Amino acid sequence: MKPVELADRRPTSVERGEDEGPRSESRPKRHRVLVVLNGTGEGAASAIAMGRLVATTLHEPLHGLFASEAPIAAGELPRLLGLPFSALDGMVLDVEVGDPVDRIVTFTQTHPTAFVIVAAESSAHDGLGLGELAAQTIEQSLAPVLVVRPCHRLSLSRILVPLDGTPSTASALEPAGELARRAGASLDIVLVGEAHHGPQMEHGAMGAPQYVDQPHHEWPAFSGEFVHRFLNTIGHCPKDVPTRFFLGAGDPADEILRFGELLGSDLMVLVWHGLASEEHGAIFQRVLRRGSCPVLVLRCS
Amino acid sequence: MSSTVTAAVREAEPESGRSSGFVATTPMPGLEHPFRLFVWSWESQSLPAHAPEVARVGRLFDALLAHGARLSIVTEASLERLLPMVEGSIGKENRKRLYVATDGGKRVFGFDHRGSPIELFEGDGFGGDALAFLMREVAGPLEIQPADVLVVGEASIEGAVVLSGEPAGLGRLAEILEQQLAIEEKLGPFAPPRDAAWSIVESGFDVAREHEIESLLTIANGYLGIRGSVAEGSSVSRPATFLAGAFEPSSDVSSVPELVIAPDWGRLKFTVEGEAFAVETTAMERHHRTLDMRRGLLLREGLGTGAGGHATRIRTAHLASLANRHLLLEAVEITPQNFSGTVVVDAVLTGNVKSGSGSSHWASFEPREGLAGPMLVGRTHGGLELALSSRATSADPGSMEMRCERELGPVSATERCTLRVRLGEGSTLHRVVGLVTSRDVDDPARRAEALGRETAATSFEALLEEHVAAWQARWKRSNVEIDGAPRIERALRFALYHLIATVHPHDPRCSIGARALSGEAYRGHVFWDTEIFMVPFYVHTWPEAARTLLLYRHLTLDGARRKAKKLGYEGALYAWESTDTGDETTPEFVRSPVGEIVPILSGFEEHHISADVAYALWEYARMTGDERILREEGAEILMETARFWVSRGETKADGKFHIHRVIGPDEYHESVDDNAFTNWMARQNLRYAVAIARGVGREKAATLGVGPDEIARWEEVASRMYLGVDPRTGLIEQHKGFFELEEVNVAAYSPRTVPLDVLLGRERTRASQVVKQADVVQLLALLWDDFSPSARRDNFLYYEPRTAHGSSLSPGIHALVAARLGLVETAARYLEQTAAIDLGNNMGNAAGGVHAAGLGSLWQAVVFGVAGLRTAPADPETLILEPNLLPGMRRVSLPIALRGRSLEVHTCRDAVEVQVVDGPAPIGLSIGGRAGVRHVVRAEPGRSYAARRDEEGFLAWEEIRP
């Protein structure tokens, strides 16, 4: 299983040689960073800021999408959102008619999209605790969705990637690593061990060692093997990204959140299988609700 | 120039290749496949047992059984009707792999060690389905795949190759069996073992698991060990050849000595018609690696098609000779499947190696043109010189179809062999590599070159035979059979394979690291693991090796003296982690996976190691009768460690001798006072020293300046040792204050995906009664006869539920003690857990190497626990047998060496049999009868004895036919 999009991305800055002839459909496609402008002005402002940061980091175009039941002029957007006119500078605006989530999904189907950036509603308490727009975007978008709250500090220096020791969650490492590489950020990998849970049965899974005969030998050996297996062998994470590995113990959601605080993470990357009901989904929901930094959600296909 | 002809090529699996990470294999062999299980549906009514055709087929099956195949005969006939054919055609030894389902499959029989039938099930045990029983009980645990099963007759097994045949088809069956028998001859060294109980097979190529597979498939001979990496390498391969006993500094944050990684000698690059043949880039239809434990061979078969469409089968065999530990052998067979043309094999010696810590141990290399083949001579930063000589030849000495050229690089020496290969014909290349270091001779290059010349005069087959014969000799003295528990039997064989392979019986400069010679974890450091968990195996199967391991402790005694002195004590305190000098090499700090800097106290406080060495030495001498070691080296060890203990503690106001601030085997509790294991073992150490100083070691005592007063002091300290026994309950307190610690329900945290101390946190764990590993239980195992039956049971039942088994050393000892206590279900659970430490592990824990102590504990659990063997405390010339067969086990058969005698012990459900194979004098056998009566016999060499079981114990010994 691979998260969609970023995993298959190629560098976009490749220049064409003089003898390659005129541009054609085979030219490198640029992956857009799409900011969802619907919602509150405060939310939209935080999404725009995050979008700018990501787009600048990736050297990709920044798009803003606003969907409404009735047609409106693009020039009306700043007023509708309660934002200064300059807030939308440098952004390609897509003002559309229809359901916002439908339009977002259509956009990601139509255009190569690096990330969809959507703001969470600060007052929302039900479901994923993000508000309907963000929740449905996560559930339906094929592109990775980055959820941001107005209270979040916006930076991309430390990226936290919780893994559960399965190759499917390790699929987050390639896109997360690529983002980290572009941003000059470091990756913090967290594996959480817990009680009342047997080893992961997915083929190629790896958990904390059952036997730690001598911790000063076992832990470095385990960490080295884990990082090798998941970052290099399965995750195909870029090799030049500084990486640290941490082992947590206890409730996985609590531990992920604790490490997020402890390490001063700027972004958490979560892999979601798409089911809120399953155990992994419950952890996902809690981290999304309580995360102290933006969360990037990668869907396993 | 080459020509390519058209031939049928099976499509490669679409998933194969690097991108998916997994290469699938195609399991549909034809009749040329060496089947492991034959199912023969015998129509007895139309062909009676005495019919010549049946007898012929029986004899052919007998030959296949001798190769390790298994046979199940399914018949309408009764056992009585079938038995004459079995007894007339199939040898007694081979019947161990024979199963007969009689009376239309209503009854299933196996055969015991005497070749007599034993009923495995009757009636509806498996719904009356004998084949379902066999597949579940025999094929399943040994991972015999349906594709490895040949069914002859009407029986049905999904996925098996089925030959339906009427009686007239017996002639055809005989032809097929002859064809099967020819496979081993045709494949020679490349023939995979038929007996799944003797092989570890890894199919496909799994990039995620490759590191642990490399560990499991290690080949070694005690002088060196080679991980089972694919010869051509891959993006994830971590090949390494370890030199036992040779150390260089690591590049760890806290640098410690680590085993030297020798130049890579086994690298082979295959180029088929200009394209590399490699597991990651060639579309592999089949890819298997097989560890042939009986012969000590690593086999590989790869059938793949390159991008150009050339399909090639390549088989390889690798070994580290057990007959001449300086020899490494490789054989390669290349068979084009759809072309004739050219294959180039690069046989490489390269110094381009680094350790897992990132250290390059080699200061310089000098590739040379040798007389017999290229050489690579290197020198480590520490001054160790190593020389490798290599010689590749065609298996057909007069062949003009292979030419080899030499190529010397800055740090490598290559033989590039170009082979003219023909469609469907195997071309075989042999390679002999000699490896010598300056630890062996003054001029290793000259010796390696001489080795090359000497081996050039010997055929590859002869070198191979010597190696196989050396392994056979070892297995004869080691192999354990467990009828009814095939998974445990194979795991034990795997354990013994590594234990045999990892010891050098003649070089006391080497001991055994925690991960043997199979991986870089633990850096090759030697712990108490060797003396307490591994040495007992060698004592009873390879006493010379046990002696050598103990002499390592004598060679490193000065290091132990230095450590004691450094910490302010007298005598000798062995390093918790020892390498070549005996100086302490435990790092002082580590960064935990939760990011904390954690001080490591074991190097400062885990002092029971000195008593463990003393215990192992004493037990070795008791079990072998080797008095010489007690007079000399052993005496020195025992007395110097006794001196340490006296200086280590003090007599307090209670009149008892106390040892404070130590770590026992339970490392969750550091800096504790009066750890029971430490104190009890120290007392033993002192007692041994007293006995030796007043006995056979008098002269050595004099040379060490040990006088009567000092001996009396040892005796007094031993008698005053605080032992922590609660007089009310009989419980031994693990350390002072342990009983007051918080009780934590360990079972409430099961299952878990992280050790319990990580879940609870360091502080809470220390403040609780959670025990990392057998501590008091370890004491019960070692000093069994010092405890009353109730003390053994009560203490086990107290500590077992409190033990989190955070160490691989723990489950095996719990299996041993539980079995001795007759807690067979508990013992079975722990035995399974021990057997799975490496083999049941797909979670990466074996990536850094196999768990050598766990392997040793598995042997101990079976021999000391299940078979219930130990010597009488007052008379080592008497072997006590108190068997405790675990559920499902029908028989445990094992050889054991005891004080110069070789015994064969067969523990069955209804009897125990002992054959004194050889020895200089009779030996006592003692077994429990009714009402506490013990039956003892002085068993004569060359004779066999049996004690039959009745409801309340065993009857008196009787002599039986051998």
Image (cartoon, coloured by chain):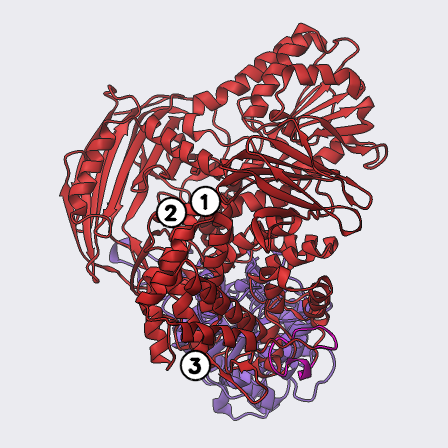
Chain colours: A purple, B red
Q: Are marks 2 and 1 on the same chain?
A: yes
Say above or below: B499 vs B558: above
Q: Are there few (<14), some (14-19), or many (20+) residues within 10 Å of tag 3? A: some
Q: Are marks 2 and 3 on the same chain?
A: no
Q: Secondary structure at mark 3?
A: loop
Residue B112 on the magenta segment: no
Residue occupied by mark 2: B505
Residue found at the far right of this picture: B124
Q: Are marks 2 and 1 in contact (CB under 8 Å)?
A: yes
Residue type at numbered disc 1: Trp
Which quadrant holds residue B300?
top left
Q: Are there few (<14), some (14-19), or many (20+) residues within 10 Å of tag 2? A: many
User: Which residue lies at the image location 45% right of the left edge and 63% below the top edge?
Assistant: B613
Q: Secondary structure at mark 2?
A: loop
Which corner quadrant holds the C terminus of chain B? top right
Q: Are marks 2 and 3 in contact (CB under 8 Å)?
A: no
Say above or below: B538 vs B847: above
Q: Secondary structure at mark 1?
A: loop
Say above or below: B296 vs B61: below
Name the mark nearer the viewer: 2 or 3. Answer: 2
Give, as a single range, the part of the protein colored magenta. B727-742
- Foreground residue, B815 or B829? B815
Residue occupied by mark 3: A157
Q: Are marks 3 and 1 on the same chain?
A: no
